[in-house]
Image: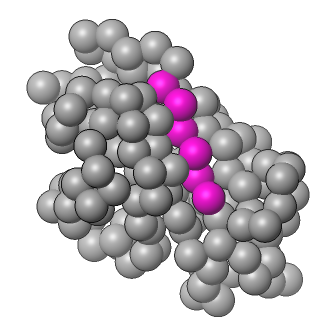
Amino acid sequence: MRPEDGDRILRDNFAPWVLDLGLTVEEVGDGTATLRLPWSDRLAREGGGLSGQAMMAAADTATVIAVCGARGGFVPMTTVQLNTTFQRPVKDADVLVHVEITKLGRTLAFAEVTLTAEGRAEPVARASTVYAILG
């Protein structure tokens, strides 16, 4: 799958408020995906740090794109579990959201997600996700 295919999946299948995050697909492969969550003052919380809710939504959304990459296109799915650990604040930087599918079964997909502020090596957050594949 190409990044533009991932962007099309975003446009065609996600709620308007998710699209308002401004996510773009940087890379998508066989069980991997990297999305960009652009910095926005609208997504900052008190104190100027990027809100955890925005990062969790980005991790959740990026998992869908990675599963689609592994399956060769969009299939209906839903989040079963999303567990996020925040490690560092993000201020004035885009966040790269990288997903690796660790197990893809017929009805469940498991993934690990690493969120990194652009230009920095250390993660700002990590997440693990489980998805039920419905179609």
- 22 horizontally vs 127: left or right: left
Determine whether 84 is above or below 86 in the image. above
Location of residue 23 (image quadrant): bottom left
* Residue 58: percent from left, percent from top: 51, 56
Q: What type of secondary structure mainly makes up the magenta span?
A: strand
Q: Is residue 100 magenta?
A: yes
Residue at horizontal 64%, vertical 89%? 41
Q: Horizontal and vertical percent for residue 57?
A: 50, 56
Against 4, residue 62 (above or below) is above
User: Where's residue 68, x and y in %?
Assistant: 28, 37
Closer to the camera, 125 or 78?
125
Magenta highlight on residue 62 = no
| Vertical relation: 11 (above or below) 35 | below
Q: Image point 72% across, 66% down: which residue?
A: 118
Is 88 left or right of 69, judged from the image as shown? right
One can see residue 14 in this view? no
In the figure, residue 119 lies in which quadrant? bottom right
Q: How is the image coloured?
A: one colour
Q: Residue at x 74, y 63 (%)?
A: 117
Query: Which quarter of the rendering shows the C terminus?
Result: top left
Q: Nearer the viewer, residue 14 or 94?
A: 94
Region in magenta: 96-101
Which of the two residues, 71 or 50, is positioned nearer the viewer here?
71
* Furthest-bottom residue in this view: 41
Quarter of the picture holding the N terminus: top left
Q: Position of residue 93 (x, y in %)?
A: 72, 76
